[in-house]
Image (cartoon, helix red, strand yellow):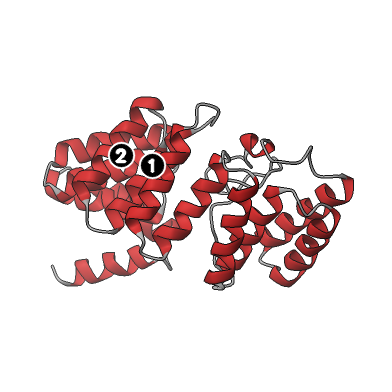
């Protein structure tokens, strides 16, 4: 199975996953900008990366670097690619190279924070996310703060995670990931009414996933709304029959 990563800092305006753009403030690099050959090859490298064609992506990034070795965004793209290839030392070195060339690039900081979190270096990750969010030129600080919350939650720090998610939602009330995570946190605290409310807000801005449907099932089992429960179950079985969550549903049904 091909691994994926949120490509939220790739210099050019490509979109991936949650409509996160490719780094507007990454133009604050130390050179005047990538030349035409560098831009074209970087664009192709990103496209191949999104397709999972990693050898071709590496080839294009090598050509981009040869054309414009001082452009920070190229090293950010290298970092993402090497992370996908589990070449973690190379990934970190290239993220650091990108930030050395452009210390104010919040998009690269965000990607580097995700890398650090994946490496279970949660305190470093959260510090990096918050540093990204502090940049007044960063267009989407709420994304970095949400990522800090995700990292805290994964590392069993739910109180801190909730603090980050609330802060992100204060900036932008329409962040689906933060809303879904707040629903999960409310469910974890057995505050099922709040969990339902956050899930409903999430659905105002995003479509159901297998995980959101499974969360809805668990909430409605506690709340006792049989119609809502049946709707969630049917949707999970029909739309995500091969998901882990569908398997969990089958196990839970067999236990009753």
Secondary structure found at label 1: helix
Q: Residue at x 78, y 55 (%)?
A: 69
Would residue 86 be seen by someone viewing this image from the given angle? yes
Q: Residue at x 42, y 51 (%)?
A: 209
Would residue 220 be seen by someone viewing this image from the given angle? no
Q: Mark 1 points at which residue?
A: 146
Proximity of marks 2 and 1: CB atoms separated by less than 8 Å: yes
> Which of 101/75 is in front?
101
Q: Residue at x 58, y 49 (%)?
A: 99
* Residue 216 numbered tag: none
x and y percentages locating residue 50 in the rendered image: 66, 58
Q: In this view, does 82 lie to the left or right of 191?
A: right
At label 2, counting other C-alpha atoms closer than 10 Å, the crowd grade (few under 14, some 14-19, many 20 or more) is: many
Hey, which quadrant is residue 242 in on the image? Answer: bottom left
User: Quarter holding the C terminus?
Assistant: bottom left
Q: Is residue 65 left or right of residue 218?
A: right
Q: How many labels does the image show?
A: 2
Q: Name the residue under label 2.
A: 164
First along the sequence among labels 2 and 1: 1
x and y percentages locating residue 138 in the rendered image: 53, 31
Q: Which residue is drawn at 16% across and 50% down?
A: 188
Q: Distance between the residues labelled 2 and 1?
A: 6 Å
At label 1, counting other C-alpha atoms closer than 10 Å, the crowd grade (few under 14, some 14-19, many 20 or more) is: many
x and y percentages locating residue 244 in the rendered image: 36, 67
């Amino acid at each position: 199975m091909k691994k994926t990563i949120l490509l939220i800092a790739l210099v050019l305006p490509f979109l991936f996953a949650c409509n996160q753009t490719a780094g507007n403030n990454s133009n604050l690099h130390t050179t005047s900008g990538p030349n035409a050959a560098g831009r074209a090859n970087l664009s192709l490298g990103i496209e191949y990366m999104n397709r999972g064609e990693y050898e071709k992506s590496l080839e294009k990034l090598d050509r981009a670097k040869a054309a414009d070795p001082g452009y920070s965004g190229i090293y950010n793209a290298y970092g993402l690619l090497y992370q996908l290839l589990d070449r973690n030392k190379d990934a970190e070195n290239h993220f650091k190279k990108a930030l050395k060339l452009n210390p104010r690039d919040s998009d690269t900081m965000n990607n580097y924070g995700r890398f650090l979190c994946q490496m279970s270096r949660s305190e470093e990750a959260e510090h990096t996310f918050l540093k990204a969010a502090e940049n007044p030129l960063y267009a989407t600080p709420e994304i970095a703060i949400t990522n800090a919350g995700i990292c805290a939650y994964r590392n069993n720090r739910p109180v801190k995670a909730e603090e980050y998610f609330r802060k992100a939602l204060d900036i932008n009330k329409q962040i689906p990931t933060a809303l879904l995570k707040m629903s999960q946190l409310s469910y974890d605290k057995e505050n099922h009414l709040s969990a339902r409310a956050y899930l409903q807000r999430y659905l105002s801005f995003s479509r159901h996933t297998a995980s959101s449907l499974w969360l809805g099932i668990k909430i409605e089992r506690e709340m006792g709304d049989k119609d809502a429960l049946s709707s969630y179950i049917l949707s999970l079985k029909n739309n995500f029959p091969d998901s882990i969550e569908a398997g969990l549903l089958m196990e839970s049904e067999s236990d009753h």
